[in-house]
Amino acid sequence: MIPLLHDFTDATVLVFGGGPVGARKARRFAREADVIVVSPAFSDADFGGAERCRAAPDPDDVPDWIERAAPDLTVAATDDEAVNDAVVAAARDRGILVNRADRAGGREPGSVVVPATVREDPVVVAVATGGTAPALSKYLRRELEATLDGAGAMATLCGELRAELKARDVAPARRRELVTDVVNSPAVWTALRNGDPKTRQVIEDVLGEELPSAGDRS
């Protein structure tokens, strides 16, 4: 499987299953998408504000639900294998992405795996083990949370610095060198992780060192 990042803004995700797994899937996608959860009963878990439809569709009813919702992604998260089979079949027939939560490994074409994710906006890192070791995914996610501390602020800083250098006509190769130097600076990482980024000062320091050399070359 090839990892991709997909923008679900204004998209619809249809989840079959109101248990803890369905709730977890709903919370994940409700950050961006409109989520509809179909189930005869719902656990006490948080569904992230998703719309909940109390219904008990049998396998023959599943295609109608998918037709009405017209989802961009369908999730099969019930405890009924026949219903999950029907969800997968109906989604595949319509060219809709599908995530099946009750099976690991042996994914069929068109399947989607929802990985363990670490966010340090705008940085996003996902970990997947092909369904073979969910516990390992969770462990690695915890490890990455510490490693990525400050990465979001660093990404923002680098974006601002690149824009400033480009606006001042610094050559692309030189821009890459300067940004790489910032990324590799322990002092900058320490400042970002301590909540004292001083991004404007870092940018000014880099520009102050670069502009005289640019003038010498002219």
Image (spheres, rainbow, N blue to C red):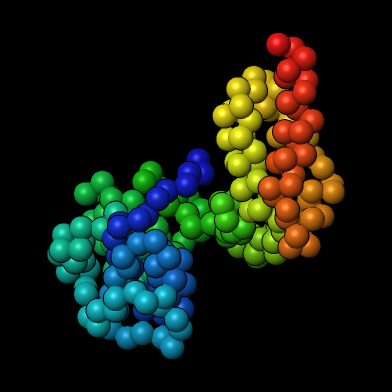
Image quarter (top left, top right, bottom left or bottom right) of the C terminus: top right
Give me the residue at 76% from left, 33% from top: 208
Q: Position of residue 28 (x, y in %)?
A: 46, 66
The relative height of residue 21 versus residue 122 in the rendered view (above or below) is below
Residue 161 or residue 205, whichever sits in front: 205
Give me the residue at 31% from left, 65% from top: 34
The relative height of residue 142 versus residue 197 in the rendered view (above or below) is below
Residue 142 or residue 216, whichever sits in front: 216
Q: Quadrant of residue 183?
A: top right
Residue 182 appearing in the image = no
**153 displayed left or right of 72:** right
The relative height of residue 71 versus residue 168 in the rendered view (above or below) is below
Q: Quadrant of residue 47?
A: bottom left
Residue 215 or residue 178, whichever sits in front: 215
Q: Position of residue 99 (x, y in %)?
A: 40, 58
Q: Position of residue 181 (x, y in %)?
A: 78, 35
Give me the residue at 48% from left, 44% from top: 4
